[in-house]
Image: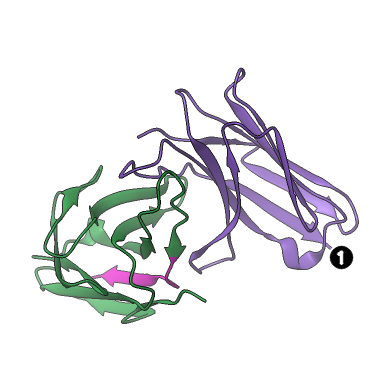
Amino acid sequence: DVKVTQSSRYLVKRTGEKVFLECVQDMDHENMFWYRQDPGLGLRLIYFSYDVKMKEKGDIPEGYSVSREKKERFSLILESASTNQTSMYLCASSISQGVEETQYFGPGTRLLVL
Amino acid sequence: SQQGEEDPQALSIQEGENATMNCSYKTSINNLQWYRQNSGRGLVHLILIRSNEREKHSGRLRVTLDTSKKSSSLLITASRAADTASYFCAPSRGGYNKLIFGAGTRLAVHP
C-alpha cells in the first residue's frame, strides 16, 4: 500500500516564525502536492511538483514556498507565518501514469498560528 | 484544471438507507474520481470512472457518469454509521492536470 506521511499531526507556531511542513511518500511517485483545507472552501492547491527540483504554483501560492530535493520528499515552507495561514495542510502524491492519476493523501497537519 | 461541485452540501440519513451524492463540472474530462475524508484526516480514494464509462461498482458504491450533462453521482447502498464522512468529487483531464476538489458533501449516518 502507498504510504504518505506528514511530519506532524498538530503544530502551533507564532506569527513571523518560519515553518517547515514535511511530506514523505514511499511509492516512488513522480507527482506530489500540497493543499490547504478550510471549512466551506474545500481543498485548495498551494503547490505541486512533478519531478525532483521541479515545482509549479497552484491556486494559492502566496506566502508559501516548496522544496523537492529528493523524489520521496516534498516540503512546504511558510517563510513568515501569519494567522491567516492557520489551516489543515494535506500532502498528496500520485504516479504519472497516462490519464489516471489517483492521489494518495497523508493524514494532514493541523497548523495553528498565534 | 476545473472544479467539481458536490450537491447536497450535507446529507443526514439512517443506517440501512441509501445515500446519493451528486457532482457537476464544466469542461471535458478524461476521468472523474471520488474521495472520502473522515473527520480531521486525509482523503482516501474511493473510485475512478473513465469518460467512456457510464457506471462503475465497487462493493456498496455505485458511481455513474453522464458526460453529456457533465455530472456524476455516487450512491452508497445500505449505509452504515462508519460511512459518516465528507465525500469529494474530482474531475480530471489527466496528465499534469491538477485535481481540484470542491467543498464536498458531508454525510451523517445515524444508528
Residue extending farthest to the right is: B16
Q: Quadrant of the C terminus of chain A?
A: bottom left
Please identify the quarter of the rendering in which residue B96 is found. Answer: top left
Magenta stretch prevailing secondary structure: strand
Q: What stretch is highlighted in magenta?
A: A105-114
Which residue: 11% across, 73% down?
Answer: A17
- Image vertical order of residue B86 relative to residue A92, above or below: above
Q: Where is residue A66 in the image (x, y as percent from the top left)?
A: 15, 63
Q: Is residue A21 above or below residue A36?
A: below
**Which secondary structure lies at badge 1?**
loop
Q: Is residue B21 visible?
A: no
The quadrant in which residue A13 appears is: bottom left
Chain letter, green in picture: A
Q: Position of residue B76 (x, y in %)?
A: 78, 50
In this figure, which residue is indicated by the disc labeled 1?
A: B111
Chain corresponding to purple in the figure = B
Q: Residues within 10 Å of mark 1 (few under 14, many from 20)?
A: few
The residue lying toward the viewer, choosing from B95 and B20, is B95
Left or right of B17, for residue B85:
left
Residue A112 lies in the magenta stretch:
yes
Q: In this rendering, would A76 be left or right of A105? A: left
Residue ranking furthest to the front:
A98
Q: Which residue is drawn at 40% across and 45% down?
A: B99
Q: What residue type is labelled 1?
A: Pro
Q: Is residue A44 magenta?
A: no
Q: What's the chain of the residue with tag 1?
A: B
Front in this rendered view, residue A72 or A6: A72
